[in-house]
Amino acid sequence: MERVTHLAMAPQRAEGVEYLRSRTGALRMAEPKAKERVLEAVRDLPDDATVEDAMERLYFLAKIEEGLRQAEAGETVSHEEARKRILG
């Protein structure tokens, strides 16, 4: 995929947002980089959050990303198989 960073290359798109152009020419927003996702997650915490709260939130988000990656790769099990694994 080609990275598109200039508005001239991506008309009517938000400035400062990076887009990716597929081989077919379609544009889609690039995924935020890990550092940006971490900073956003920390900014979203309440003012009285502890370091443990931040660590828990980041771990939770990492597990969600891992699950999404696995699902996209087809690394899933059926509902019935999950029940068997959990309930025996």
Image (cartoon, rainbow, N blue to C red):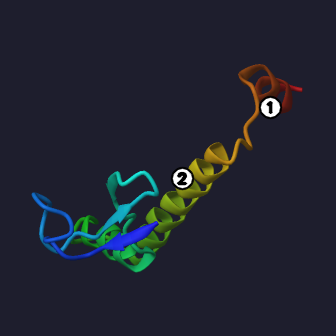
Q: Is residue 74 left or right of residue 42?
A: right
Q: Residue at x 14, y 71 (%)?
A: 7
Q: Compared to 71, does 85 lie above or below?
A: above
Say which of 14 and 22 sits in front.
22
Q: Position of residue 72 (x, y in %)?
A: 61, 46
> Which element carries disc 1, helix, strand or loop?
helix
Residue pushed farthest front? 24
Residue pushed farthest right? 88
| Count of number-bearing discs | 2
> Label 2: which residue?
64
Q: Compared to 70, does 6 lie above or below?
A: below
Q: Quadrant of residue 16?
A: bottom left
Say which of 81 and 86 sits in front.
81
Amino acid at dot 1: Ile
Q: Residue at x 19, y 76 (%)?
A: 6
Closer to us: mark 1 or mark 2? 2
For the residues labelled 1 and 2, say whether their Cβ atoms are less than 8 Å apart. Answer: no
Q: Quadrant of residue 54?
A: bottom left
Q: Is residue 28 left or right of residue 17?
A: right
Amino acid at dot 2: Ile
Q: Position of residue 14 (x, y in %)?
A: 13, 63
**10 Å neighbourhood of mark 2: few (<14), some, or many (≥20)?**
few
Per the rendering, the mark at residue 86 is 1
Say which of 25 and 60 sits in front.
25
Say which of 39 and 3 sits in front.
3
